[in-house]
Amino acid sequence: MTGAELEREVSQLKTQLEHKTMSGRSLAEVCYKAQTDMKTIQEELDRRQEELSTLRDRLAQMETELEVAIEELVRVKTEREQGRTEMKDLQQQLSEMHDELDQAKNTTQADGTEKQLLLKRNKLLLKVSTDKQLLLKVSTEKQLLLTVSTDKQAPN
């Protein structure tokens, strides 16, 4: 081989070395970028998994609160129905007392003292019955207000 051929071969080898060096740098840059992208994606995945866990916990808490609210509504509904039944019973008793009172007024067989005692008794029973109705109504309205106020305070 001559000197010129050797120089040409050396020049070719230098060019090949430069290409390989450039190619190696490009590969290193691509690898670094891939690692950086992978780290970013992993961080995003971790954030999303934490967010999902938080949402699941919140959902479980809301389901529990909903169950409690439903139980409370069922309880209040039952109490309201009981109150209505008691109210009907009291109205029936009141009606019967009115009938007795009317009978007592119209009875001619009883003497004046017995009539007066019966009238006083019936008036007293009527007052007690009316007081019970009023207390029951107030209690029912209070329960209804508490239920409405609790429902308004519940988070959406």
Image (cartoon, rainbow, N blue to C red):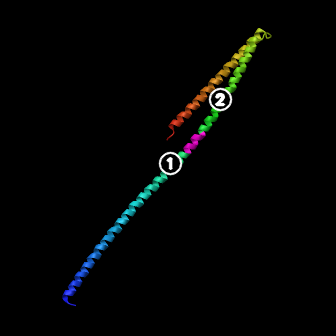
Judging by the rendered image, the residue that carries numbered circle 1 is 58
Magenta includes 67? yes
Q: Quadrant of residue 136?
A: top right
Measured as percent of width and height from the top left, residue 101 is found at: 73, 15
Q: Is residue 112 left or right of residue 139?
A: right
Which amino acid is tagged 1? Arg
Kindly report the secondary structure that dominates the magenta region of the rendered protein.
helix
Which amino acid is tagged 2? Arg
Q: Is residue 61 left or right of residue 121?
A: left
**Towards the viewer: 21 or 71:** 21
Give the Cα distance between marks 2 and 1. Answer: 38 Å
Residue at left offset 65%, top offset 29% = 84
Q: Is residue 113 left or right of residue 28?
A: right
Residue at left offset 34%, top offset 65% = 33
Q: In front of the other: label 2 or label 1?
A: 2
Measured as percent of width and height from the top left, residue 122 is found at: 71, 17
Task: Give the residues drawn in magenta, as a range.
Answer: 64-71
Q: Quadrant of residue 148?
A: top right
Magenta includes 69? yes
What SS does tag 2 mark? Answer: helix
Measured as percent of width and height from the top left, residue 76 is found at: 61, 35
Judging by the rendered image, the residue that carries numbered circle 2 is 84
**Comes first in the chain, label 2 or label 1:** 1
Measured as percent of width and height from the top left, residue 3 is found at: 19, 88
